[in-house]
Every structure is written in structure tokens, then in C-alpha cells.
Image: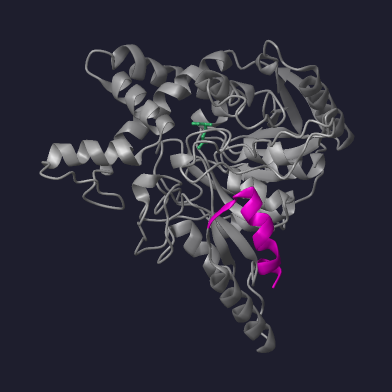
């Protein structure tokens, strides 16, 4: 019933691509039956969650918000979604997103953008971006359509949308969550993670989603810590680093004020604040926008009109024509832009100048973090350089859109756990997010700091 009552709201926001109320109801019934039988409840017993459409879900259409996957219904379940069902959760539906997770505003979806449930309080009534690429996830949680959802984060796609709508989200260490059954964007960066109303819910979700998977060659063979039980919100004895290079040019005063507020909260919770330097920060964005498209161009070669969804086979056409027609019709403009950039930077003549160089920069960025850890345990920064912008405001200018990822991509390139928690509202009444970055495998430290700051 609650689901049906929310369907109208969901339609306005365009957060769901597919609705699966029966899946959620079955989980609720199973939870009731287990309770009646006196069994110990599973960690997510009966919890109805949203599933980003990047996750393949058995028997449920999965399109990554692209026309090229229209009509594709996976005969298998992604490891992460399967783990969530094993933990007792049920699925309300598949959530809208930027096409193939490429974007920061949800505007690259082939099925229409998602609208943030937030409005500015200054009378400006423009519809706002819910962030991206996990924009359906952020909007659905902020609008109270579901208590939690999955996201994926390649360069910020969990953290930036969480920041834009005032919720929490964590990208764990690369390798914590299996990528098996998650539509690939940039395989060396892609990580799944939870988005939820608060840090505790994120910890519970992350425990269910994490764990070794022999089907993913980059999966970490480590036990999953009891993060929720370990939550304290106590930062005594912790040194929190403030990276001076994140004080970027033209940073709005309100973002700086948010950062100072976060620093004050961290001190209140007992942390010691230290200034640190991450000297290669300014090269992170250009390196990311070479490496991610390069990997994407390779990953997306599989959409050939033979396997998966769309096939465009013009009358009398040959194989090459079918590839071209299918890919021309199936991929959106941002996806085509990335494939072109990616093929260019990987081409024989330019490989060394671009891809090799970007890979070296990536190593330097990882080393910056390693050096910072000699001085501090965690890093605190803003999540994004702005609050939610209006839909359409940046969609004509890809560079302006890419710049919104400036604070989230460095930790992605280094594979580190990072989280966004709500940091309060700006003068227009819009949420701003604080980002905590941790050492590899220190999700506990990140979650604890998140709890102290939220
Ligand atoms: N906005 C970034 C991009 O477009 C990050 C996307 C993501 O993390 N999936 O690539």
C-alpha cells in the first residue's frame, strides 16, 4: 500500500525505470514468516530497497539507462544484489541513473532525467539535478520512496548525488564489493556501495553488500568487518587531515564555510586537525577523464547488436552496418563522446602521450595519499564544489559538468574508501555534503567520522 501511495510521487521524480513491488512484498512476507517461526531476523529482513539499474537483476529488465540495453533481461543476478536478497531485503524497483553511469546530473539517462525532490527557498522554482550518476537512488531516498538504495561510484557517483539531496553514501575500498553482474563502465574504478538516510543504515547495507567473490578477479579475499557494531562517532585520538590543494580556485564561500563547520564538528568529537598536502590533486580530473573513457571504450565494445538488447539491422545490411546502426541508435551523446575520447587516447599514436601519462599521474595521486597517511588517519573535504544545480544548467558544457567531480575523483583513482554525509544547508536552503576519505580498508574509520559529522 505504501508502495502504491508513493507511485505517483515516484512518477513525478522519474526515479524508477522498473517497479517490482512483488519482489519487495515477497521479502516482507518472508520476514513475517521468519518472525512468526521465532527465527532470528536477517539483517535487512523485509527492508524494501531501490536497485540502481547498473546492477543486473535476474528476470528484471536491466538497461543501465541506455537504449542499447532496452529489452535485455538478465538471466543472472549480480553478486551484490544477490547478497542483499540473502540478507532479507526486497526490491521496490530499478532506479534511473546516468546512462552507463556517465554523468553528474542524471541528465544522460535515455529515459529522461530524474528530478530532485528539493527546491531552492528563494522563489527560484527551477527543477534541480539530483546529482549523478546514482540520481535515481538519491532522489528516491530523499523523497522517502525507499529507506536505502544501491549506488555505484566510479568517480563520485555515490557521493555527489548523496551530497545534492542531503543523504549519506559510501564508496568502499576498491574490491570490497564484487563487480560481477554490474554493467561495467571503467573496471579499475567501479565500486558498488550503499546510499541511505544515515550513516548507520549505510553501515548495515555495506555489510550485506561486501565480501569476496571468486567471480570478480579484483575482489578482495577478506572477511567483512562488523561495521555497524563498531560505530562510535568518537574521534578522540584521530588525526584528521585537511588537504590544502582542495581549496580550489573560485570555491564558493558557502562551500568553504561548510568545510570550516565540518572541521569544528570533528574537533568537537575529539579529533586533532592537521593540514596536509596532496600535491598532484589538480591532475586528478584530467587523468580520470582519460582513464575512465579509455576503459569505457573497451568495455562498451561488447554492445554489438548480436548480444544483449538492441539490434538495428537495416534492410540488406552486412555485419559492419549492423554494428554501426545499432551503436548509433543505442548509445546517447555522452556515451559516444566517452567512446571517442577513449579510443583516441588508446590509439597507437597517442597511447603514450595520454593513457600512459594518465596512468603515471594516477600512481602519483595514490602516492600523495600514502604520504598524507603518515600525518593523519582520515581526510575531510567538501563532497562537491557546489550545491545541486538546475537541470539544464551544465548539460551543454561537458567540461563544466566534469568539474563538479573535482573532489571525488582523486580517492577513486587511489581506490580508497570515501563517504559523503549531510553537512547542512546553504543560503538557498539546499543541502551540502562533507566528504571523509580513509585509508584502504578503513571503512570503519570513515563510517565513524561520518557518524560524528552527520
Ligand atoms: N561524474 C563522473 C563521470 O561522469 C563519475 C561517474 C561515476 O562515478 N559513475 O564519469
Residue 15 vertical placement versus 411 (above, below): below
Residue at image position (59%, 21%) is: 371
Provide the major secondary structure of the magenta segment.
helix
Q: Position of residue 444 (x, y in %)?
A: 67, 46
Residue at image position (66%, 68%) is: 4
Residue at image position (24%, 38%) is: 325
Foreground pick, 188 / 234: 188
Q: Position of residue 439 (x, y in %)?
A: 60, 35
Q: Quadrant of residue 204?
A: bottom right
Q: Position of residue 281 (x, y in %)?
A: 57, 17
Residue 192 vertical placement versus 375 (above, below): below
Residue 156 seen anywhere in this rendered image of the structure: yes
Residue furthest to the right: 268
Residue 146 seen anywhere in this rendered image of the structure: no
Q: Quadrant of the C terminus?
A: top right
Q: Position of residue 42 (x, y in %)?
A: 63, 72
Q: Which residues are magenta?
A: 1-17
Q: Is residue 412 left or right of residue 179?
A: right
Foreground pick, 273 / 384: 384
Q: Quadrant of residue 27?
A: bottom right
Residue 295 vertical placement versus 110 (above, below): above
Residue at image position (69%, 34%) is: 436
Residue furthest to the front: 315
Q: Quadrant of the N terminus?
A: bottom right
Residue 205 vertical placement versus 330 (above, below): below
Q: Is residue 208 left or right of residue 144?
A: left
- Scheme of image coloration: one colour
Residue furthest to the bottom: 37
Residue 50 counted in the magenta span: no
Amino acid at each position: 500500500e505504501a508502495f502504491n501511495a508513493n507511485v505517483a510521487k515516484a512518477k513525478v521524480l522519474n526515479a524508477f525505470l522498473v517497479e517490482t513491488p512483488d519482489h519487495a512484498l515477497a521479502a516482507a512476507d518472508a520476514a513475517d514468516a521468519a518472525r512468526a517461526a521465532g527465527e532470528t531476523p536477517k539483517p535487512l529482513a523485509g527492508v524494501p530497497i531501490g536497485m540502481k539499474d547498473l546492477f543486473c537483476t535476474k528476470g528484471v529488465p536491466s538497461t543501465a539507462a541506455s537504449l542499447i540495453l532496452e529489452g535485455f533481461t538478465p538471466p543472472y543476478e549480480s553478486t551484490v544484489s544477490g547478497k542483499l536478497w540473502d540478507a532479507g531485503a526486497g526490491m521496490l524497483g530499478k532506479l534511473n541513473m546516468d546512462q552507463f553511469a556517465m554523468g553528474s546530473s542524471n541528465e544522460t539517462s535515455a529515459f529522461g532525467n530524474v528530478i530532485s525532490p528539493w527546491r531552492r527557498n528563494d522563489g527560484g522554482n527551477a527543477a534541480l539535478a539530483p546529482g549523478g550518476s546514482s540520481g535515481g537512488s538519491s532522489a528516491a531516498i530523499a523523497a522517502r520512496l525507499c529507506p536505502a538504495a544501491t549506488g555505484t561510484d566510479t568517480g563520485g557517483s555515490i557521493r555527489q548525488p548523496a551530497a545534492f539531496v542531503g543523504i549519506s553514501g559510501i564508496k568502499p575500498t576498491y574490491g570490497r564489493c564484487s563487480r560481477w553482474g554490474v554493467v561495467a563502465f571503467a573496471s579499475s574504478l567501479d565500486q558498488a556501495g550503499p546510499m541511505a538516510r544515515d550513516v548507520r543504515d549505510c553501515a548495515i547495507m555495506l555489510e550485506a553488500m561486501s565480501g569476496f567473490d571468486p567471480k570478480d578477479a579484483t575482489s578482495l579475499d577478506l572477511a567483512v568487518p562488523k561495521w555497524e557494531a563498531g560505530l562510535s562517532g568518537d574521534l578522540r585520538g584521530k588525526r584528521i587531515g585537511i588537504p590544502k590543494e582542495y581549496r580550489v580556485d573560485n570555491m564558493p564561500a558557502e562551500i568553504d564555510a561548510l568545510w570550516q563547520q565540518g572541521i569544528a564538528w570533528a574537533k568537537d568529537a575529539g579529533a586533532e586537525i592537521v593540514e596536509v598536502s596532496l600535491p598532484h590533486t589538480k591532475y586528478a580530473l584530467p587523468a580520470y577523464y582519460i582513464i575512465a573513457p579509455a576503459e569505457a571504450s573497451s568495455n562498451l565494445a561488447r554492445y554489438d547488436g548480436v548480444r544483449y538488447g538492441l539490434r538495428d539491422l537495416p534492410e540488406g545490411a552486412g555485419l559492419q552496418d549492423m554494428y554501426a546502426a545499432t551503436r548509433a541508435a543505442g548509445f546517447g551523446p555522452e556515451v559516444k563522446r566517452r567512446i571517442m575520447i577513449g579510443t583516441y587516447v588508446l590509439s597507437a599514436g597517442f597511447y603514450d602521450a595520454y593513457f600512459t601519462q594518465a596512468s603515471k599521474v594516477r600512481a602519483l595521486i595514490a602516492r600523495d595519499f600514502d604520504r598524507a597517511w603518515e600525518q593523519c588517519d582520515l581526510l575531510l573535504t567538501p563532497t562537491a564544489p557546489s550545491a545541486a544545480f538546475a537541470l539544464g544548467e551544465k548539460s551543454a558544457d561537458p567540461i563544466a559538468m566534469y568539474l563538479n567531480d573535482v573532489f571525488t575523483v582523486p580517492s577513486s583513482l587511489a581506490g580508497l574508501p570515501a563517504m559523503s554525509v549531510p553537512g547542512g544547508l546553504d543560503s538557498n536552503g539546499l543541502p551540502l555534503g562533507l566528504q571523509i576519505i580513509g585509508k584502504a580498508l578503513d571503512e570503519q574509520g570513515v563510517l565513524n567520522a561520518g557518524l560524528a559529522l552527520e
